[in-house]
Image: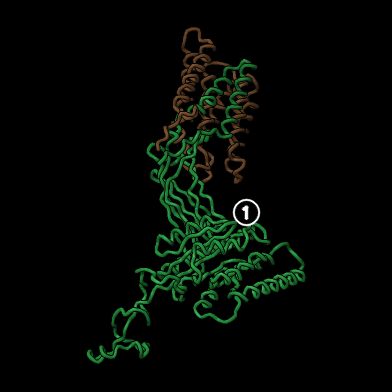
Amino acid sequence: MSASPVRPLQWRRRTLGLLGVAGGLLALGVAFRSPVALYVALPLLLAPLAAVLGAPRGSAGASLTWGESGSADVVTVDGTVTPDPGISAADLVLELPRPAGLTERAPDVTEVEEGEIRFHRSWAARAPIIAPVEAPHLRWQDPAGLVERELPVVGDPLVVLRYPPELTRLRSIRLDRTTVLPGETRSRRLGAAGEFFGIRTATPGDPMRRINWRASARSGRWLANDFALERTGDLLLLLDARPSALGRGLDEELFAVARAAAAGIADSLLAAKARVGLGLYGEFLEVVPLATGRTQRARVRAALTRARISAEAGPTERCVLALRRGFPPGVTTFLISPLADEAELELVPYLRRRGYPTVVLSPSPVPWLTSGPRLAPEDERLVGRIVALLRRRDLERAWRDAPALDWEDFRSLGGFVEFLRRPAPRRFG
Amino acid sequence: MRPAARVGPAGLLLTLAAGAGLALASRWPSGWVLAAVVAGVGATTALRLVRSAGLRPYAIAPATLGIAIAALAAVPTSATELVGGLGGVALLLWLADDPDRGPSGARRGASELLVPALGLGIAWAAAALLPGGALPFGVGAGLLVAALIALAAVLGALEWLGRGAAETS
């Protein structure tokens, strides 16, 4: 472990002003032969030096305790910063940068109490989001604000994650296994099929086949069997991180939504003991191999948190070839892609041909495309219709190889979840 | 924060008192000098009350200008020299009582004012009390204090010279 680098002391602009005024007074004092002006200047000249004398050592820092709470679109961050001994919390200036994709809900609150700084931030998430919250920037400033030094803040990382709540219902979908002996992992869920788990009192809704007739005859009351459901199977989440014809800004917006949805899907299925893997395809394929458990959830979240749209787009064939090295054919694949250009549309048939049964979840760029520069109402309607028709054409093309579900209302994924639970032959939205 | 606290009453009163003291001992018409001091202090007070965060860091400038005018106009005596020096300290106190940095700024700033006040005291005492009472004594003493403090500052901030805490691995 290496010590954090020593942060230099920095003069503030105010100091230069003060020294300028003091220098001017000195010059005027000499010019007008006025010692009084020299006496006024003397404290002003000494003040910056006094400020430096009171500065904390370069190795000083602060510890951070913080957490995130709230539900739906409300994101609340509360924390406490405790400086090292010898540093007054009142001399510290705290700034907490707001992650992109979040807006302010209420004014920031920062209070200095009993040697520590407490802060409260209330933000709103307009769309699904997975974003790290940068640790607060902490600066020591002398009371007169003449000199400052940045202080390193040590604390756990914090990630804001919001995704549509319907994704928690994904646990009940059936996924195929891709290994003969998947290991000892069993589902914690009880159901109607799988390995026998135990007997319980029957309830009015139990079908006849769940009744344990022998046990019921012996005990004289209705008893039913419970079964431990088998592990649900394997899933590959594949995100297309290539730059598209939509442009960098819109690509980033859609990719942020896609990352949050992928995190939600992974959370839900990992909780049901499925094995989940992740592929992020930009110029090259970045992979989190199939695995299950909390560690895998952390791995997937970390990969999604740092994922960004790549500078260059890799060829489609490279993605599928690289996938074959990390994931066995036959693994159920959720491709999350806006399907905005030819390269993105090409990926769907490639996946099918290489043996990956795929479902496409496509975050729609239509809301952004139709909310551009102001047009006349007639033109705006026309543009909207054309964009919607093009989008429909692209989705229909993708449907030839795999179910492709349009995702336009980013607050809900009900349609996607219902489709996976009861697949329909052909459906949009 | 309440408006009274935003203004920084301690700094305001001390600066106004020092400015008025200098104005009363002025070579120029006292009324005009006093008006300049009051205008400067008033402008600083107003700037500390404005909502615009861009202007507030420069709020101290008008009061400094007012004190500077009064200092240049004052008849040089031991008393006016001391009042002028105290005016400089009062300006620093007002600067430390920053409305954007929470309450009790004046109290926090007191420790930082110790060194300038000490330097001023030594310079003034040297000029006023040493035999000859000549100005060069005071200026010399002030420069000596400044040099000592500069040396202490350099020794206390070794990382400025690239000699910070040793990095371990």
Tell me how many marks there are: 1
Does residue A195 appear left or right of residue A32 in this picture?
Answer: left
| Image quadrant in which you'd find residue A250 | bottom right
> Which image quarter is the C terminus of chain B in?
top left
> Could you say where residue B67 lies in the image, as x and y percent from the top left?
59, 27
> Could you say where residue A249 lies in the image, as x and y percent from the top left?
64, 57
Q: Could you say whether the residue bearing mark 1 is in a helix, strand or loop? A: loop
Residue B57 vs residue A170, the one in the foreground: A170
Residue B26 in view here:
no
Residue extending farthest to the top is B132
- What amino acid is found at the position of numbered circle 1 in the picture? Ala
Binning the other alpha carbons within 10 Å of mark 1 as few (below 14), some (14 to 19) or many (20 upward) gives: few
| Picture residue at 60% right of the left edge, 46% below the top | B51
Residue B110 vs residue A308, the one in the foreground: A308
Residue A391 in view here:
yes
| Picture residue at 41% right of the left edge, 72% below the top | A180
Q: Please say if A211 is above or below A52.
A: below
- In the rendered structure, the residue with mark 1 lies on which chain? A
| Image quadrant in which you'd find residue B76 | top right
Residue under numbered circle 1: A311
Q: Which chain is green?
A: A
> Could you say where residue B120 lies in the image, as x and y percent from the top left?
49, 21
Residue A150 vs residue A202, the one in the foreground: A202
> Could you say where residue A141 lies in the image, as x and y percent from the top left?
49, 37
Residue A171 vs residue A131, the one in the foreground: A171
| Picture residue at 52% right of the left edge, 69% below the top | A333
Does residue A180 appear left or right of residue A407 in this picture?
Answer: left
Q: Which chain is brown?
A: B
Does residue B115 appear left or right of residue A213 in this picture?
Answer: right
Residue extending farthest to the left is A218
Name the colour scheme. Answer: by chain
